[in-house]
């Protein structure tokens, strides 16, 4: 019917088709060139070259699909916003293998990642286990703030200490400490390789080491460490490179290698388990010292400045300011304060969906942007507040502006499959932030439970009443506790997805296949194709969307990997 969404979609597509045909005309005569006309009519043998083949016709190629500027910015189009499912990417030419596809990207101006995957700061998605596994595979985890300051800082420390190069701040004890002190460290942090120094501090003379083998068969927990510690130590002396230290550790077959200065004072420590992790996860996201990258979310209230002080001391590499609507004086003030107080800390602002919002945050000094409002599977912002934007339109328009300032953007929300990841990247995003896509994995917080014979795990939006009661209300209300809480999310459950050790490789390979089918060997090349018009896009009718999924089957089993 006239004026319906389907009729508007049809009108916009037919208008674009007429525009595309007009571009294939001969500019000099304002008429179709003979070869272009012949090929468009299907007469592909009309104008062969010297080898009897019809050369590639660039005018004909431009008739396939539409450039992003036509889909999202054409003045003749109807006023529609598009989601990932509304668009389809046309294939390109493949001249490389799928394993050659390079997914390296940037999360902020200074933080590079091996994979464009970032876990969302939600209390049912990212704590230290998720952050560790994401970083090991080359992505990044953003730890949520729906907990006390001390608890969040503890989560950061667990992530930063999981995998290290030179451990510059290991736990140290004195010879007068007892076995129970080592056991407490082991129970809290999962390791028991403790250097023993004269005064129990770094920079003091190393006198011994205590490991699991030293305490396993000690019955009295009050036994002093000086009675059981190993004193015949293999050590490395500064200056020493990480490669040289790893060689000593490998040849000595020891679990820990202390590094001392010329006077025998402890300056750092290297762990054998880190050697194995380096072997198993060669593309892990690490900082300059070899520790895993870790990010945290904070709000914009005055108390969040105290929170950030503790997180910086714990070692975070990037802070994500978490707000459902990022263009506020509260966030702008927070960004400026962070940049003045911690100029070396990378800051990601958001959430935004318009160029105006993005520009304000860029001018305030952000190093990255988080794009999305109301598009998550558990988010009801668009329904409750009538504010937001379809995700494909939001990502494309914000990325186009942010690119001019060298600010990477992360598409947050609306990602339900590897196809959506590819579409987010193709619209200009450098990373995708995932919540529901990672929910239900072993590394997410919470316990599994069974319902109707199906193994499930809790998953909820940070705008749900349950999450707000835990502290996430400040994401939606910046000035204080509201008399009436208005939910902008729901609580639910998702099916068990297993471990990220198997799931992330699946997401990675699916994304690589998408880029390969488009003829883009890297994320940066795909972005170039987006802005030079080589990337071609079409809109999908509701029938086309149904056709693109599983259909016409009585029953089927959908296995992802």
Image: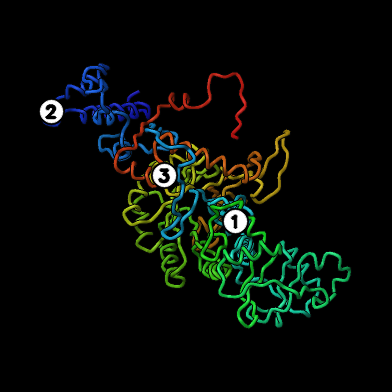
Relative to the observer, which residue lies in front, 204 or 157?
204
In the shown orientation, is residue 124 left or right of residue 116?
right
120 vs 190: above or below: above
Q: Secondary structure at mark 3?
A: loop
Alpha carbon separation for disc pair 3 and 1: 24 Å
Front residue (pair 120, 99): 99
Residue displayed at 76% across by 67% down: 211
Residue at 72% x, 37% y is 451
Q: Is residue 80 above or below residue 135?
A: above
Which of pointers 2 and 3 indicates the residue nearer the eye? Answer: 3
In the image shown, does 136 or 119 lie closer to the viewer? Answer: 136
Of residues 385 and 169, the one nearer the viewer is 169
State the residue lying farthest toward the front: 251
Quarter in which the N terminus is drawn: top left
Q: Earlier in the sequence, mark 2 or mark 3?
A: 2
Name the side, left or right, on which 561 lies relative to 531.
Answer: right
Tag 1 residue: 278
Q: Position of residue 271 (x, y in %)?
A: 66, 64
Badge 1 marks a residue whose secondary structure is: helix
Residue 143 image point, x, y percent = 57, 57
Percent of width and height locating residue 70: 29, 37
- Residue 522, label in figure: 3
Label annotation for residue 30: 2
Q: Secondary structure at mark 2?
A: loop
Q: Is residue 469 visible?
A: no
Depth check, mark 3 against mark 1: the one in front is: 1
Q: Position of residue 197 (x, y in %)?
A: 70, 79
């Amino acid at each position: 019917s006239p004026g319906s969404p389907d009729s508007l979609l049809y009108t916009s597509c037919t208008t674009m088709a007429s525009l595309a045909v007009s571009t294939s005309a001969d500019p000099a005569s304002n008429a179709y060139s003979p070869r272009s006309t012949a090929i468009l009519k299907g007469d592909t043998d009309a104008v062969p070259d010297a080898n009897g083949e019809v050369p590639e016709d660039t005018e004909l190629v431009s008739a396939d699909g539409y450039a992003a500027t036509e889909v999202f910015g054409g003045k003749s189009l109807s006023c529609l916003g598009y989601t990932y499912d509304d668009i389809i990417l046309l294939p390109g030419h493949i001249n490389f293998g799928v394993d050659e596809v390079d997914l390296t990207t940037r999360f902020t101006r200074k933080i590079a990642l091996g994979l464009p995957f970032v876990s969302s700061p939600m209390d049912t998605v990212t704590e230290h286990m998720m952050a560790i596994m994401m970083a090991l595979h080359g992505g990044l985890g953003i730890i949520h703030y729906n907990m006390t300051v001390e608890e969040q800082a503890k989560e950061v420390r667990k992530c930063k200490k999981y995998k290290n190069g030179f451990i510059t701040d290991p736990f140290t004890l004195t010879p007068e400490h007892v076995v129970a002190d080592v056991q407490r460290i082991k129970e809290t942090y999962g390791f028991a390789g403790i250097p023993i120094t004269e005064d129990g501090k770094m920079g003091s003379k190393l006198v011994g080491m205590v490991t699991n083998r030293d305490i396993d068969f000690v019955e009295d927990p009050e036994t002093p460490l000086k009675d059981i510690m190993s004193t015949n130590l293999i050590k490395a002396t500064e200056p020493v490179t990480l490669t040289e230290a790893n060689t000593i550790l490998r040849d000595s077959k020891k679990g820990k290698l202390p590094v001392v200065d010329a006077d025998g004072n402890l300056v750092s420590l290297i762990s054998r388990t880190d050697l194995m992790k380096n072997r198993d996860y060669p593309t892990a996201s690490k900082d300059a010292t070899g520790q895993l990258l870790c990010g945290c979310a904070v709000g914009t209230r005055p108390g969040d400045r105290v929170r950030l002080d503790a997180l910086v001391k714990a070692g975070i590499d990037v802070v994500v300011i978490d707000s459902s609507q990022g263009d506020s004086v509260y966030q702008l003030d927070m960004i400026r304060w962070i940049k003045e107080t911690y100029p070396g800390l990378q800051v990601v602002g958001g959430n935004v969906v318009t160029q105006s919002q993005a520009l304000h945050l860029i001018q305030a000094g952000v190093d990255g942007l988080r794009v999305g409002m109301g598009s998550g599977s558990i988010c009801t912002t668009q329904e409750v507040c009538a504010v937001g934007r379809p995700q494909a339109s939001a990502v494309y328009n914000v990325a186009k502006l942010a690119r001019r300032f060298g600010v990477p953007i992360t598409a947050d929300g609306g990602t339900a499959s590897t196809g959506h990841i590819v579409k987010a990247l193709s619209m200009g995003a450098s990373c995708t932030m995932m919540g529901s896509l990672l929910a239900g994995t072993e590394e997410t917080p919470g316990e599994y439970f069974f319902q109707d014979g199906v193994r499930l795990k809790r998953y909820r939006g940070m705008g749900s009443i349950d999450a707000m009661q835990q502290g996430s209300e400040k994401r939606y209300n910046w000035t204080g506790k509201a008399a009436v809480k208005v939910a902008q999310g729901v609580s639910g459950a998702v099916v068990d997805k297993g471990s990220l050790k198997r799931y992330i490789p699946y997401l990675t390979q699916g994304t690589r296949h998408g880029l390969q089918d488009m003829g883009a060997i890297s994320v940066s090349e795909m972005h170039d194709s987006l802005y030079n018009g080589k990337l071609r896009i079409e809109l999908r009718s509701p029938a086309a969307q149904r056709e693109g999924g599983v259909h016409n089957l009585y029953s089927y089993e959908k296995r992802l990997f």
